Image: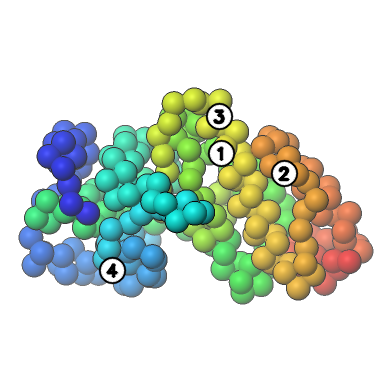
Amino acid sequence: MKLSEEQKEKLKDECYVSFIKKSEIEGILNGYEFLSDGSFASSYTDFSSSVIKRYFKNPYLKSKNGIIIFDYKDVVDNLINIFKISQKSAAIPFIFYVVDDELLMYKMPFMKGYNLNEISSQKKDLYLSDIKSAWKYAYYLACFFASNSITMYDLNPANCNIHDDKLLIYDLDFYKEEQDKRIILLNNYETVNICFANFFEDYFFDFCYETEIKDFSNNFFCDDFFDEFYDHLKHPCKTLKDAYKNLR
């Protein structure tokens, strides 16, 4: 991602940045193992403390009608802004790597736990109470980011984990600073609720399960959702697999 002069100055003044040569990249990645490929970057990790995200193309976000609404310049501005936030439950970058005026990599904390997307796609088991606790904790994160004027764009089951009854999130490239904190909070609540509703829909795909609750901005949607979900079960259940066996 090619940096403007203003962005380079901000990185130097406001962030922790390392200006390196291309020949140094492999040395930095030494000791890290390949984790996954995304649409714009590859991730490498030491599976204990940190993840390195290495871009292979400029990231961008399109609207439903195909218009680019968030380009690589916006991503850089967002990463610089989000660097200043302290939040242990989110993979906030803590060092940026710049090569020839391009932001090529950054390092962020390793997020432990069970990935929501993998739980649903591989039908892994987990206590429903843990999911409910993580969902409620996600409301705390929604409030936290809203208090910092940040909308949680791109929160989805593929980029969040459940660990110790908490939701841990990563891939914050497309989060966005905005002004109206009240609207941001409602948008963040809606994003959290849709994320978890999609998780349940994917996990119970064979049953065509879909919530009938329409107010996705409701702070108490988590409780409402589970009340509705339990009503669809033949017997009381404690885990996802139990529920899978007993869904009507």
Disc marking residue 32:
4
Q: Which residue is located at x 69 percent, y 42 percent?
A: 216
Report, in whole angstroms, how far the alpha carbon at label 2 lies from the one at label 4: 38 Å
Quarter of the image where the N terminus is located: bottom left
Mark 3 vs 2, N-terminal side: 3
The residue indicated by pointer 2 is 222
Disc marking residue 183:
3
Residue 193 position within the rendered picture, expressed as x and y whole percent measured from the top left = 65, 46
Near mark 3 (Cα within 10 A), the count class, few <14, some 14-19 or many ≥20, is some
Residue 137 sits above or below residue 178 on the image:
below
Near mark 2 (Cα within 10 A), the count class, few <14, some 14-19 or many ≥20, is many
Report, in whole angstroms, how far the alpha carbon at label 1 lies from the one at label 3: 9 Å
Tell me the mark number nearer the camera, choosing from 4 and 3. Answer: 3
Residue 172 sits above or below residue 58 on the image:
above
Disc marking residue 188:
1
Near mark 4 (Cα within 10 A), the count class, few <14, some 14-19 or many ≥20, is some
- Are the two marked residues, 2 and 4, in contact with CB atoms closer than 8 angstroms? no
The amino acid sitting under disc 3 is: Ile
Report, in whole angstroms, how far the alpha carbon at label 3 lies from the one at label 2: 20 Å
Q: Which residue is located at x 22 percent, y 66 percent?
A: 29
